[in-house]
């Protein structure tokens, strides 16, 4: 299985995903530049965190218009798996591959803290190894993570099970105090209707080793790995 | 020449300095040349009042790869790798424009690190503000924190440690000292030298504009009520461009495409040209009109001294230029060839064909005088030294501890560091809030410990001891994490050195630091001096800040401050002598800054630190925390709060519980050990000749301290946590 990490000018969590996949999962991974015209040969594409184009205009707005996003869109339209983390999530909403928008944090400050996140949909290739309502400890680090969607679209999102992760307290309650940025309904991760594109503000790649304080983020990477290995087994049979 | 006369004074040069310049040039400088001299001979660039004193610092050792004089210091960290680090002040810009002042301080120190060819891996910072009662102070504090995060978060380098103190003396003159640490394969080290006749001089990065004109001269004067008119002297940062420049520069260095690299910081192009030329003993020929400008109509002098941010200078062999251009193109960056390395030792600058400056590089970059300023012991020194410490009644001990934990100086700084990305690069295995931060090194499997420390109240009350204590504490913090110190970088923030009392503080502090560095084997590999931290004649406390870097064999070896397990034995290592002189208790409880800090026995300090490292390396110490401001009681509370685990202690009576709990003294560390290891730890302490006292056990949800069968302190963790964590968010709301 081959993982691709897309590097835009100003991406800075690219190496964090890269090393997690290479050193912890011991999987095959390569960087893809923002000016690439093809993304062939990859099974999963990761849009990493960072400050693409310095967050100028709006976070993710300029990266969403770089050459590589055309093949990424085709890849996603064909059912390819795309994971956007933090700024990568912002790029995906700016591209329209995911619904909603990420506003400035309500308190207007950058926030780098550990959060507790509940799995709301464990039937996706990204989350199948987790159980519904599992609690994951993962850090956030962003200034613009305040997820917003108008009420009617929000209803649709909930009905389609597109809410994948929510900030919660230790009891699993989506309490305002557990919400680091003012996101609507404590939402911190959503997928598209088809379930092959996922974006989330917390950093699973920073929660992949005990030495860094949590291994809970690994479940996303392991789910993807399992999804592909079982597919390969089926394909081979 | 009446016009010229006005000019040099206006540019901040003295009449004597002007005479020296004409002597070195053997003629009168023209206005462009004078502008170049004035910025390079400013205090900020030439260190003219500090250079002689700085010679006291030891700067060599087997681990030192590059000492002072280059863009940053370099030490060997084993396996063919080196750590590159430096600290620098950006005080005056931050006093005027806190966000940009702090952001460009971070951007500037960052450039110093990748200029050497190193990958930046961590930021640290040391900050001082007034006491936050005024809206202005809160504005400065909030702006500086935003600026540090704004730049650091964007470039993807984690801000992992720091220190912040508050005192009215910093009300109008805050301190913003930023430190950066990088890692590189040793053989990749590039220096800021313009070698090789015919090699190209290439400028990369931002266009040159009128921002930051005369910034270094502004930094070399006292601030005044009129300083707001100097706002154009504050530079504006672009961290996105900074990030692209890091990547492109490191790629160029890795591919061996450049022979010399120099960043453009203070004094802009003038500094980069004359320093690279003088280090190499070469000449340069430069065509100014080739520089991409942000606005039309800039004069030659403006172009030469502009401090526009995010610019780099490269010395490139002509046949490698195309390859270099390709690298930069891929990062969407432009290059401009300004000229070439020439014979002789002059920097010759042409503007539209006309020679506008032709100056000896060495004279501009290194010809400034080294003064021997007058030094006089200030009257306050003896006045404040002789004092009798008040006695804190027993019943007041618990409220006093809560007051200390809830003081701005000692409270939790989470409100600050949660605004910094301290995790990006996924190497931070110990982050903010500990004695030092620990970063794993992917390339070698080892780990670096980094810290920044300084107690200016101590230095004010006794500059010599204060200087020593700053070095000791930084080294001790590394040792408490289990790291062997490799070297330090210092940022010396003082008042006007032309005043004998101010210079005395400086000289004394440097002497104390130098002595401690010698005994503790801590070479000073780079640093920065910031004088003229005065507003309308009122100086800040003398504030030497020490940034230190140490090495661990592997990240798992590290030790933190937290009491994590109940039932562990708490040992106090180090001498029992303490003093309330200059203590946090005096400041917070009695609003007094008096007395002298406890005397330092450097040999004892060295033995203690070796013992702490040994206990950690042998896996006996489960937690280690040095005793600093607030003494034993505050250190215990911090260990308890960090791990959410209480402690119960029985202390030998001293007759002065206040001194036992809150007295401050050097060379003291708390460690916890498992019951089965207790005997072994005590034996090792005895063998090391370090006093070791068993205080009690960790456990429970309270901090209970008894002495002579009496409870002298009994506090719920919850109450301490509230005091510790709630003050800063509340004050800044």
Image (spheres, coloured by chain):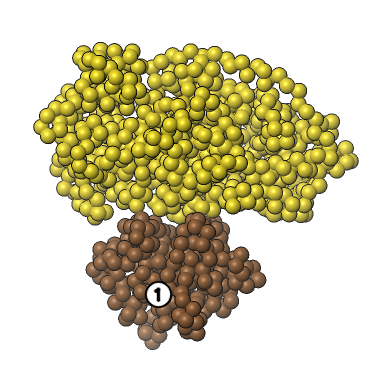
Locate the C terminus of chain A by quadrant.
bottom left
Tell me which corner region of the image, top left, top right, bottom left or bottom right, holds residue B294: top left
- The chain letter of the yellow chain reads B
State the residue at coordinates (51%, 15%). Answer: B500
Which residue is at the far right? B709
- Residue B87 in view, yes or no: no
Q: Chain of mark 1?
A: A
State the residue at coordinates (29%, 62%). Answer: A33
Question: Horizontally, is B356 left or right of B239 in the view?
Answer: left
In the rendering, at what x and y percent does residue B106 appear?
42, 43
In the rendering, at what x and y percent does residue A153 appear?
45, 80
In the rendering, at what x and y percent does residue B715 appear?
78, 49
Q: Is residue B102 above or below residue B299?
A: below
Question: Horizontally, is B503 left or right of B241 in the view?
Answer: right
Crowdedness near tag 1: few (<14), some (14–19) or many (≥20) residues, C-alpha within 10 Å: many
Instruction: Using the image as rendered, state which of residue B538 and residue B425 is in the foreground.
Output: B538
State the residue at coordinates (61%, 22%). Answer: B462
Query: Which residue is under mark 1?
Result: A98
Instruction: Using the image as rendered, state which of residue B399 and residue A80 is in the foreground.
Output: B399
Question: At numbered mark 1, what does the secondary structure look like: helix, strand or loop?
Answer: loop
- The chain letter of the brown chain reads A
Locate the N terminus of chain A by quadrant.
bottom left
- Residue A149 in view, yes or no: yes
Instruction: Using the image as rendered, state which of residue B591 and residue A71 is in the foreground.
Output: B591
Which residue is at the far left? B353
State the residue at coordinates (72%, 49%). Answer: B720
Q: Is residue A142 above or below residue B291?
A: below
Q: Is residue A24 above or below residue B575?
A: below
């Amino acid at each position: 299985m081959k993982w691709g990490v897309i590097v835009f000018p100003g991406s800075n969590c690219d190496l964090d995903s890269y090393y997690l996949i290479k050193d912890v999962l011991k999987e095959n991974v390569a960087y893809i530049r923002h000016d690439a015209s093809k993304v062939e040969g990859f099974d999963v594409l990761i849009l990493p965190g960072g400050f693409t184009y310095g967050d100028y205009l709006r976070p993710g707005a300029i990266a969403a218009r770089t050459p590589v996003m055309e093949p990424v869109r085709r890849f996603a339209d064909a059912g390819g798996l795309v994971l956007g983390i933090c700024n990568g999530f912002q790029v995906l909403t700016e591209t329209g591959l995911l619904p909603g928008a990420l506003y400035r944090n309500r308190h207007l400050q950058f926030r780098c803290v550990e959060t507790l996140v509940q799995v709301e949909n464990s039937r996706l290739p990204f989350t199948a190894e987790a159980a519904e309502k599992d609690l994951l400890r993962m850090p956030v680090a962003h200034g613009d993570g305040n997820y917003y969607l108008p009420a009617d679209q929000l209803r649709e999102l909930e009905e389609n099970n597109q809410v994948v992760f929510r900030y919660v307290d230790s009891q699993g309650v989506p309490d305002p105090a557990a919400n680091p940025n003012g996101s609507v309904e404590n939402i911190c991760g959503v997928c598209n209707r088809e379930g092959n594109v996922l974006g989330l503000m917390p950093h699973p790649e920073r929660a992949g080793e005990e030495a860094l304080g949590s291994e809970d983020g690994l479940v996303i990477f392991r789910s993807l790995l399992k999804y592909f290995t079982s597919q390969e087994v089926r394909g081979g049979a | 020449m009446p016009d010229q006369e006005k000019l040099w004074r206006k540019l901040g040069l003295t009449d004597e300095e002007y005479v020296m310049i004409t002597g070195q040039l053997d003629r009168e400088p023209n206005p462009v040349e004078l502008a170049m001299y004035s910025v390079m001979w400013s205090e900020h660039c030439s260190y003219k009042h500090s250079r002689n004193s700085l010679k006291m610092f030891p700067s060599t050792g087997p681990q030192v790869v590059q000492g002072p004089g280059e863009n940053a210091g370099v030490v060997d960290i084993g396996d063919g790798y080196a750590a590159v680090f430096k600290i620098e002040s950006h005080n005056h810009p931050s006093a005027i424009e806190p966000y940009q002042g702090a952001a460009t301080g971070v951007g500037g120190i960052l450039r110093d690190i990748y200029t050497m060819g190193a990958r930046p891996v961590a930021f640290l910072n040391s900050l001082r503000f007034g006491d936050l009662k005024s809206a202005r102070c809160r504005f400065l504090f909030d702006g500086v924190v935003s600026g540090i995060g704004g730049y650091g978060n964007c470039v993807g380098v984690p801000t992992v440690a720091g220190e912040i103190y508050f005192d009215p003396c910093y009300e109008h003159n805050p301190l913003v000292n930023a430190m950066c640490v990088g890692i590189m394969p040793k053989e990749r080290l590039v220096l800021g030298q313009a070698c090789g006749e015919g090699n190209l001089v290439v400028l990369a990065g931002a266009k040159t504009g009128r921002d930051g004109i005369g910034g270094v001269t502004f930094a070399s004067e006292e601030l005044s009520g009129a300083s707001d008119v100097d706002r154009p002297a504050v530079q504006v940062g672009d961290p996105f461009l900074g990030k692209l420049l890091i990547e492109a520069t490191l790629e160029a260095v890795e591919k061996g495409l450049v022979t010399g690299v120099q960043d453009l910081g203070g004094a802009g192009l003038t500094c980069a040209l004359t320093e690279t030329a003088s280090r190499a003993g070469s000449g340069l020929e430069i065509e100014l009109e080739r520089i991409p400008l942000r606005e039309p109509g800039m004069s030659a002098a403006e172009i030469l001294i502009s401090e526009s941010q995010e610019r780099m200078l490269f010395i490139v062999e002509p046949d490698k230029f195309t390859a270099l251009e390709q690298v930069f193109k891929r990062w969407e960056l432009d290059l401009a060839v300004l000229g070439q390395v020439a014979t002789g030792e002059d920097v010759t600058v042409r503007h539209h064909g006309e020679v506008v400056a032709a100056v000896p590089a060495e004279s501009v970059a290194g010809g400034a005088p080294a003064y021997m300023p007058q030094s006089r012991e200030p009257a306050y020194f003896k006045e404040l030294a002789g004092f009798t410490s008040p006695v804190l009644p027993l019943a007041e001990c618990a409220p006093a501890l809560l007051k200390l934990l809830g003081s701005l100086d000692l409270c939790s700084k989470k409100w600050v560091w949660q605004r910094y990305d301290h995790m990006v690069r996924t190497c931070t295995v110990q982050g903010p809030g500990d004695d030092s931060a620990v970063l794993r090194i992917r390339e070698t499997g080892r780990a670096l410990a980094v810290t920044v420390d300084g107690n200016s109240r101590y230095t004010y009350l006794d500059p010599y001891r204060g200087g020593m204590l700053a070095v000791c504490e930084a080294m001790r913090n590394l040792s408490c994490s289990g790291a062997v110190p490799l070297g330090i970088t210092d940022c010396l923030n003082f008042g006007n050195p032309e005043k004998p009392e101010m210079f005395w503080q400086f000289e004394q502090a440097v002497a104390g630091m130098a002595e401690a560095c010698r005994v503790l084997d801590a070479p000073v590999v780079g640093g920065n001096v910031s004088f003229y931290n005065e507003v309308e004649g009122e100086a800040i406390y003398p504030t030497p800040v020490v940034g230190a870097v140490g090495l661990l064999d592997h990240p798992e070896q590290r030790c933190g401050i937290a009491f994590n397990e109940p039932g562990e034995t708490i040992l106090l290592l180090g001498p029992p002598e303490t003093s309330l002189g200059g203590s946090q208790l005096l400041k917070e409880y009695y609003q007094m800054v008096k007395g002298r800090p406890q005397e330092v026995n450097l040999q004892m300090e060295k033995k203690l630190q070796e013992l702490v490292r040994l206990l950690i390396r042998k896996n006996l110490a489960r937690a280690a925390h040095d005793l600093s401001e607030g003494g034993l009681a505050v250190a215990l509370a911090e260990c308890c709060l960090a791990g959410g685990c209480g402690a119960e202690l029985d202390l030998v009576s001293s007759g002065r519980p206040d001194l036992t709990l809150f007295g401050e003294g050097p060379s003291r560390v708390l460690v916890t050990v498992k019951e089965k290891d207790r005997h072994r730890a005590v034996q090792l302490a005895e063998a090391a000749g370090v006093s070791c006292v068993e205080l009690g056990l960790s456990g429970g949800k309270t901090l209970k301290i008894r002495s002579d069968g009496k409870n002298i302190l009994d506090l719920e963790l919850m109450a301490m946590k509230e005091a510790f964590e709630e003050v800063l968010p509340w004050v800044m709301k």
